[in-house]
Image (spheres, rainbow, N blue to C red):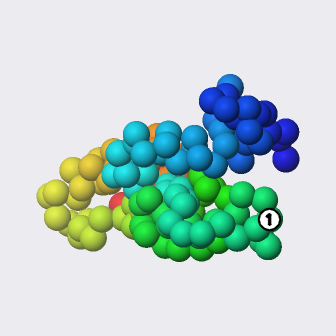
Amino acid sequence: MTDLWPCAKCDDPAVRNLGTQGWCALHLEKLYDTFDPSTFALRGVGRSSGPLWPEFGPHHAELRCNACAATWVGVPGEACEWCQESLRRMLIWQAEQVLEPPDVDLSDERFTLAIKAWADRLWVAVEAEIIHQRDAERAITRETRVA
């Protein structure tokens, strides 16, 4: 684990390093108050929502995710595991969906257009790092061999 720097605002022990500064729980909360929660979609962080729980460790408190409202005990600012798992599952689902070839009959005059549109979607998925380029190439090769 990376060493935590003292809080840049008050010199108290930090719970998180962000950029080149350390942040204590209080100032980290104030920083997160300035953010729009919708920008955290499925990448939420825990915000203090209740009392401290020192028996779990220093700076531990009841947390609520600023994106999905899940609750747990942890250090303010830590990543929401529910959001992380949901994002992971969604990316797997999206990869499965994009790798599925179009359901167009070979004799249909739109077959070539459908394959081209699918290839374009595959490329977007590669660029978005939803799938690997080799998986896209295999899918296209498999589908065009049939043609």
Q: What residue type is labelled 1?
A: Gly
Residue at the extreme left: 109
Front-most of 125 and 112? Answer: 125
The quarter of the picture where the C terminus appears is: bottom left
Report which residue position mark 1 lands on: 57
Is 147 situated above or below 126? below
Front-most of 83 and 5? Answer: 5
Tell me what residue is drawn at x 78 percent, y 33 percent: 5
Residue 63 percent coordinates (x, y): 56, 66
Residue 121 percent coordinates (x, y): 34, 50
Q: In which quarter of the image is residue 102?
A: bottom left
Classify residue 122 as left or right of residue 92: left
Tell me what residue is drawn at x 52 percent, y 58 percent: 47
Tell me what residue is drawn at x 50 percent, y 39 percent: 31
Quick check: can you spot residue 75?
A: yes
Classify residue 25 as left or right of residue 13: left
Residue at the extreme top: 20
Quick check: can you spot residue 138?
A: no
- In this rendering, the count of numbered labels is 1
